[in-house]
Image (cartoon, helix red, strand yellow):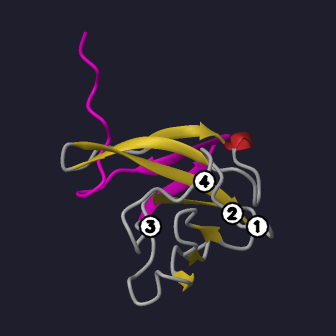
Amino acid sequence: MTPGWQPICASEAVSDGASGVRFPARIGGETVSCFVVRFKGEVFAYLNRCSHVAMELDWQPGRFFDADAQFLVCATHGAHFEPDSGRCAGGPCTGRGGLRVLQVVERDGAVYWQPDDYVEILPPVRS
């Protein structure tokens, strides 16, 4: 069973076609990076891992879009992904699938994501 919606950031932190917001999650006991971006007014969230090679996409923290803000681009090998679906749009990801989509919702001035059976929230830090 997965927990409920988890906060990522304030809605104003994610601007259309601009930098995304990274947030941590867990897969198989390992901490991984995920991100949320805004495209054509809507928010979309993905695991920060290229489908071509398991590397993070952003060339600087939060920088996922190409120069025209039309595609998400893997900084390592140039794979292009559709921002509203995560589907491969060209480059080395062709035939290898797209980005791992995360459920995301925007409400009451904030952006939230829904963990699932694969991408989980980080456990609480014990002191």
Q: Amino acid at mark 4?
A: Trp
**Mark 4 packing: few (<14 Cα in 10 Å), some, or many (20+)?**
few
Mark 4 or 1: in front is 4
Instruction: Determine whether, in the image, residue 109 is placed left or right of residue 2.
Output: right
Q: Amino acid at mark 3?
A: Cys
Based on the picture, tell me whether residue 70 belongs to the magenta stretch: no
Instruction: Determine whether, in the image, residue 74 is placed left or right of residue 20.
Output: left
Q: Amino acid at mark 2?
A: Phe
Residue 70 place in picture, x, y as percent: 73, 73
- Compare marks 2 and 3 and give the one earlier in the sequence: 3
The residue wearing badge 3 is 50
Q: Tell me the element at label 3.
A: loop
| Residue at image location 70% in from the left, 50% down from the top | 19
- Compare marks 1 and 3 and give the one earlier in the sequence: 3
**Mark 3 packing: few (<14 Cα in 10 Å), some, or many (20+)?**
many
Mark drawn on residue 65: 2
Q: Amino acid at mark 1?
A: Ala
Residues shaded magenta: 101-127
| Residue at image location 62% in from the left, 68% down from the top | 72
Mark 1 or 3: in front is 3
The residue wearing badge 4 is 59
The residue wearing badge 1 is 69
Q: Tell me the element at label 2.
A: loop
Q: Are marks 1 and 2 in contact (CB under 8 Å)?
A: yes
| Residue at image location 75% in from the left, 60% down from the top | 17
